[in-house]
């Protein structure tokens, strides 16, 4: 017998074989042991809902979607960078702020001085905003410690968020995010430290589900980045990469060469990089919040991703500097208005393709028999409303692994 069955509304399963939105009208979905056990038109149910399940829930005039996935965040950090926001408005570029000692390094100072309880409490507030808009799975990176103690502290806090607040957390070690003050002028020595000490320690502690690196002129060269990717591969950890955000250093092609789960940002990625990603099965993660906040003028090559069949995911990039965003629904709208994606592509980007960017496509991202019963029910007439409306949250119910929640970190 099923634990629960939802009946009477429409489902956007996001299963491509079912056509636009993977739509099932007047649908039913049954859950057993936290997984989808039955899905299809209500008329096809083999018995009455009350005889099939211990609990029957109706959702008439509503839509159900998979739980949303935010596949790129820096949610755990100390302090903020509101002053840098002012500086950008006064004309300073992201690169100028970084080279003047601001940017990532300023957040490093605040994060190193914060205790775990303080980091947990501040991150929980940001997480509440995201789960309140239907996020059931989230990736959280380190990278604001840049020393062994703080990198591990960030990852421990990320794990605690998943344990305490009803959300699935995937952790990513991002020790190669910036050069800390104690290694100023010695980037290769810092990469030595990452590869020999902090990355292996995170792996040994079981705190890293993946490894990331920032390949950019203000961070690490392709050769330095590749050393981190090589070490991650030796440790058996999946790879992600911040690539081609401010210039084309070939980061996307580098990511593809190592079979990365994803390459993220990608504003300056060339067609060569796109083709390499397609061949490797690497997902493109686009971050419209950072594009908007930094007032970038170079659009990521969305048409090339479509042309070559590269899956496009969308994420908040929630961080204190370049994307102080805690609204996944706003990212859907921005993906459409800024990047000219369709509403269906945008929703696919925070469900099916976001799951692929985390290596979770076998269990998450669509509503299908056998997959984890992460889902959202929305007070909307059509799925496109999720991208169309701005500053409007139509979430009626958030369900993770078959368990009801009304959103928020509670």
Image (spheres, rainbow, N blue to C red):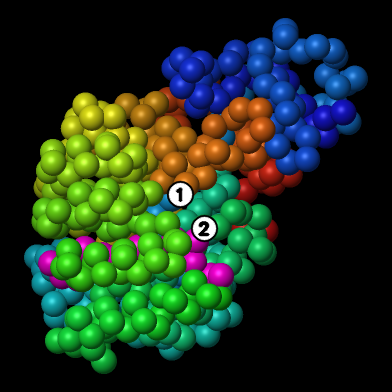
Q: Quadrant of residue 369?
A: top right
In x, y percent, where is residue 231? 35, 69
Q: Residue visible at 34% across and 51% down?
A: 260
Q: Quadrant of residue 113?
A: bottom left
Q: Quadrant of residue 172?
A: bottom left
What residue is disc 1 on?
A: 358
Which corner quadrant holds the C terminus?
A: bottom right
Is any part of residue 389 visible from this angle?
no
Q: Which is nearer the eye, 345 or 175? A: 175
Proximity of marks 2 and 1: CB atoms separated by less than 8 Å? yes
127 falls in the magenta region:
no
Residue projecting furthest to the top: 43
Q: Residue visible at 41% across and 80% down?
A: 198
Could you classify mark 1 by the number of other residues whose Cα lies within 10 Å: few (under 14), some (14-19), or many (20 or more)?
A: many
Which corner quadrant holds the N terminus?
A: top right
State the mark number for residue 118. none
From the viewer's perspective, is residue 82 above or below residue 250? below
Q: Which is nearer the eye, 110 or 379? A: 110
Magenta extent: 206-219
Q: Residue visible at 76% across and 13% down?
A: 45
Q: How many marks do you count on the picture?
A: 2
Q: Residue visible at 44% across and 61% down?
A: 237
From the viewer's perspective, is residue 144 above or below residue 326? below
In x, y percent, where is residue 65? 56, 31
In x, y percent, where is residue 400? 66, 45
What residue is disc 2 on?
A: 170
Could you classify mark 2 by the number of other residues whose Cα lies within 10 Å: few (under 14), some (14-19), or many (20 or more)?
A: many
């Amino acid at each position: 017998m099923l634990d629960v069955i939802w009946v009477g509304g429409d489902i956007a399963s996001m299963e491509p074989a079912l056509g636009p939105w993977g739509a099932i009208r007047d649908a039913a979905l049954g859950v057993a042991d936290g997984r989808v056990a039955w899905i299809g038109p209500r008329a096809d149910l083999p018995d009455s809902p009350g005889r099939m399940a211990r609990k029957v829930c109706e959702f008439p005039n509503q839509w159900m979607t998979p739980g949303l996935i935010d596949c790129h965040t820096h949610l755990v950090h100390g302090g903020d960078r509101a002053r840098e926001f002012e500086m950008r408005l006064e004309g300073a570029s992201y690169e100028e702020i970084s080279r003047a000692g601001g940017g990532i390094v300023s957040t490093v100072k605040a994060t190193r001085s914060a205790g775990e309880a303080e980091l947990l409490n501040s991150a929980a507030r940001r997480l509440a905003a995201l789960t309140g808009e239907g996020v059931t799975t989230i990736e959280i990176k380190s990278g604001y410690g840049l020393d062994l103690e703080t990198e591990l502290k960030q990852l421990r806090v990320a794990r605690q968020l998943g344990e305490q607040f009803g959300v699935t957390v995937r952790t990513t070690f991002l020790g190669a995010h910036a050069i800390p003050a104690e290694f100023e002028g010695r980037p290769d020595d810092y990469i030595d430290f990452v590869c020999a000490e902090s990355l292996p320690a995170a792996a040994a502690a079981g705190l890293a589900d993946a490894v990331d690196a920032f390949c950019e002129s203000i961070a690490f060269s392709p050769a330095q980045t590749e050393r981190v990717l090589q070490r991650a591969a030796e440790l058996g950890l999946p790879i992600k990469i911040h690539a081609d955000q401010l210039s084309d250093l070939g980061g996307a092609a580098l990511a593809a060469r190592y079979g990365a789960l994803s390459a993220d940002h990608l504003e300056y990625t060339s067609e060569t990089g796109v083709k390499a990603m397609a061949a490797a099965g690497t997902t493109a993660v686009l971050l419209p919040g950072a594009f908007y906040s930094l007032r970038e003028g170079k659009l990521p090559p969305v048409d090339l991703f479509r042309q070559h069949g590269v899956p496009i995911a969308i994420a908040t990039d929630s961080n204190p500097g370049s994307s102080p965003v805690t609204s996944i629904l706003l990212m859907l709208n921005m993906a459409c208005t800024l990047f000219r994606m369709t509403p269906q592509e945008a929703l696919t980007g925070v469900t099916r393709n976001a799951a692929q960017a985390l290596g979770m496509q076998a269990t998450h991202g669509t509503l299908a028999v056998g997959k984890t019963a992460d889902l959202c029910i929305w007070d909307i007439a059509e799925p496109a409303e999720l991208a169309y409306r701005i500053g409007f949250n139509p979430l009626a119910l958030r369900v993770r692994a078959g368990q009801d929640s009304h959103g928020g970190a509670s």
